Image (cartoon, rainbow, N blue to C red):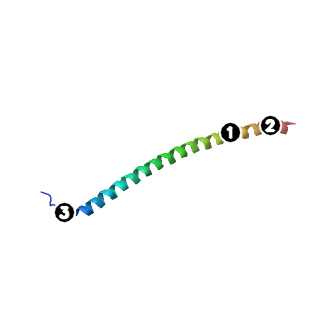
Amino acid sequence: MKPSVFVKLDDYNDIAEILDVTRQKLKEAKMLFDRINEVKSREDEELAKWQRDLGDVEARVGEISGVFEKE
């Protein structure tokens, strides 16, 4: 049998309120984390696109340079 624990009602109410605030803050933190993750994913996609575009430009510059170097 578990021993009984007695807590003053005021303390119990304070603890319950602290737990509610903590749960709300955790919920907000999770929402912020999800938002940051979404922004990071879009940023990664954009950086990958820029990298592909730079590769394309580099290849075209190489082709143009090749034409001028043959003459």
Q: CA distance from mark 3 to mark 2?
A: 84 Å
Can you give x and y, in whole percent of width and height, for residue 54 in the image? 69, 41
Name which residue type carries label 1. Answer: Asp
Name which residue type carries label 2. Answer: Ile
- Image quadrant in which you'd find residue 17: bottom left
Can you give x and y, in whole percent of width and height, for residue 29 in the image? 44, 52
Q: Tell me the residue that label 3 is attached to.
A: 6
| Closer to us: 63 or 44 | 44
Give the answer, above or below, for where 57 lies relative to 28: above
Q: Tell me the residue that label 2 is attached to.
A: 64
Residue at screen point 65% across, 39% down? 52
Is the Cβ of the residue at disc 3 closer than 8 Å to that at disc 2? no
Can you give x and y, in whole percent of width and height, for residue 23 in the image? 36, 52
Q: Of marks 1 and 3, which one's residue comes earlier in the chain?
A: 3
Is label 3 in a helix, a strand or a loop?
Answer: loop
| Closer to us: 64 or 15 | 15
Q: Of marks 3 and 2, which one's residue comes earlier in the chain?
A: 3
Image quadrant holding the N terminus, namely bottom left
Lateral position of residue 64 relative to residue 30, left or right: right
Q: CA distance from mark 1 to mark 2?
A: 17 Å
Give the answer, above or below, for where 29 lies relative to 55: below
- Image quadrant in which you'd find residue 11: bottom left
Residue at screen point 39% across, 52% down? 24
Q: Tell me the residue that label 1 is attached to.
A: 53
Q: Of marks 1 and 2, which one's residue comes earlier in the chain?
A: 1
Image quadrant holding the C terminus, namely top right
Can you give x and y, in whole percent of width and height, for residue 66 in the image? 80, 37
Lateral position of residue 14 relative to residue 31, left or right: left
